[in-house]
Image: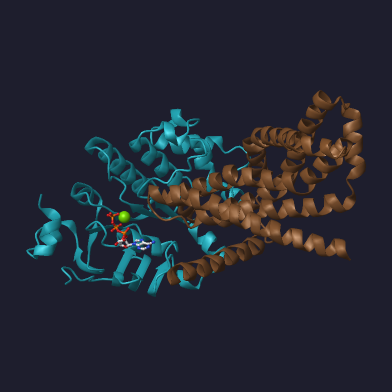
Amino acid sequence: MINRIKQFFIETGDLSYFAARFFKEALKPPFEFKELLRQCYQMGNRSLFLVGITGFIIGLVLTLQSRPTLIQFGAVSWMPNMVGISIVREVGPVITALICAGRIASGIGAELGSMRVTEQIDAMEVSGTNPFKYLVVTRILATTLMLPLLVVFGDLLALFGSALLENIKGGVSFQLYFNTVFNALSFSDLVPATIKSFFFGFIIGLVGSYKGYYCKKGTAGVGVAANTAVVMASLLLFLVDFIAVIITDIFYEL
Amino acid sequence: MKLSEEKSDYGKSVIEIKDLRKSFGDNHVLNGFNLTLKEGGNLVIMGKSGSGKSVMIKCIVGLVAPDSGSVKILGKEINNLNRKAMDELRLDIGFLFQGSALYDSMTVRENLEFPMRRHKKKLGVGKDTKPLVLEALENVGLAHTIDLMPSELSGGMKRRVALARTLILKPKVILYDEPTSGLDPITSKEIIELMHNVQKRYGTSSLIITHDVDCARVISDRMILLVDGINYAEGTYAELSKSTDPKVEAFFKN
Ligand SMILES: Nc1ncnc2c1ncn2[C@@H]1O[C@H](COP(=O)(O)OP(=O)(O)OP(=O)(O)O)[C@@H](O)[C@H]1O
Ligand SMILES: [Mg+2]
């Protein structure tokens, strides 16, 4: 037990050091723009479909589940406001980030892990390219920049799912639905959600890279790296989300 | 025990290791290892599996940080070099990894271009690096694989592509970590021949780690046996193979 606690603190320290190194190296030239673009494309490409379909289903489900209750209170016309706000503020970012933790963080963990095990990272180092810059910085930047975009995409499909259901079940036109949603959403809903998404993206890239970069030797190590990357990223996502909600709440009170 | 003393100090030394020590926890791998590689020389290091040969050779290029001792390569003490100077120096050092370490997300061509990416100006090559890549691949007889992925190559082909990648910058010193391990005798012979050709054509100095007695006999002009973390015996192939020391004999009989 004591060992576990010790391990936890060691890991936290290592991860913070890794993050500090990221900022240090990200700001120093040379910059690997080409690799960054490639990573951004890959990340979008790998998760766009998954994020879209999940968002759509979540939108459907949320709407379907809320309907009976809202009908009971005669408040079904509030549906766009309620579902819209919960999707944009909370559900969209969190679900998208969790999917990306499963898809991207594990992918990065496995990829860098196998590069470490087969000495490809050492080979880069020897050929005069800084592997931290080339592999880690580009991946963390890519996830940080791309996650907010994926969140927007996921949000839109979730809203579409919700609108579709309202259209079928309640005869609400798409135009009316989206008008109501966008009227209900205020700037103070969008800003925290966007900032949060950047942090989520950062965590996904950071944890995936960290686990892969320090992968233990052997093929088993690669599996462990991919696996623990998902677990650790998901935990951190919830932690950051919790903190973000508290901070946002404090701002609302003011 | 030294079987032959260096009588005259002819030639510059390219690599000089003095009293190198490295432990991983309680595992004392290197306990005061010494080595000198003269310009144009072919020094072979033999040692049992796990005796620390790879650790030693990685200390030379700065992939492993030694606990103590000095490593001088091409006249520079690598412990005192910053990252930029180290990268500069690595341009003159070729390193062939034990497991080839080809980048498996890149084609053969991209693998060979990778070492050049930071040094295009210095090498005097323009945007089009294809002729250089082709030349390097022709040297190892694999020009037709230029657009393949590493996963599509056999083990021996991978080793040859890795050799081409090591040679493409025409390094002054080449470090080979078990260039023939895991290959059939015929392919081994081909690789040894390639190493010989390079040596003759460019006058490079080489440090070769191997288990293969035949390889050692053909290619070495000096040999060092690494036992218990020190240079246990040193001399030419002829001298060492006649030794009556049981630990030395063990390497030559089978
Ligand atoms: N990064 C590391 N962390 C901990 N121990 C290590 C590390 N690298 C090597 N070792 C240990 O150092 C010792 C020497 O390993 P090394 O890879 O140098 O052997 P080797 O002589 O190259 O063997 P082989 O011929 O099988 O390649 C081994 O006992 C290994 O367990
Ligand atoms: Mg080895």
Q: As drawn, is A37 to the left or to the right of A3? A: right
Picture layout, residue A112 above or below residue B229: above
Looking at the picture, tell me which residue is in the foreground, B150 or A96. A96
Q: Is residue A15 left or right of residue B69?
A: right
Q: Is residue A207 left or right of residue A254?
A: left
Percent across and percent down for residue A89 are 79, 49
Q: Residue at x 14, y 60 (%)?
A: B240
Quadrant of the rendering where the N terminus of chain B is positioned:
bottom left
Which chain gets the cyan colouring? B
* Above or below B144: residue A138: below
Whether residue B183 is visible: yes
Q: Is residue B59 above or below residue A46?
A: below
Residue name at image x 81 percent, y 61 percent: A249
Q: Residue A136 location, x and y as percent?
A: 59, 53
Question: Which x, y percent locates residue A231?
Answer: 54, 52
Q: Is residue A33 visible?
A: no
Residue placed farthest to the left in the image? B244
x 63%, y 39%: residue: A42
Q: Is residue B130 left or right of residue A152?
A: left
Q: Number of marks in the image?
A: 0
The residue positioned farthest toward the front in the image shown: A72
Q: Nearer the viewer, residue A52 or B75?
A: A52
Figure quarter occupied by ligand 2: bottom left
The one nearer the camera, A26 or B78, is A26
Out of A132 and A208, give the one closest to the viewer.
A208
What colour-coding does the image apply?
Answer: by chain
Could you say where residue B171 lies in the image, as x and y percent from the top left?
Answer: 45, 52
- Chain A colour? brown
Point 49% across, 69% down: residue: A5
Where residue A64 sits, quadrant-wise, is top right
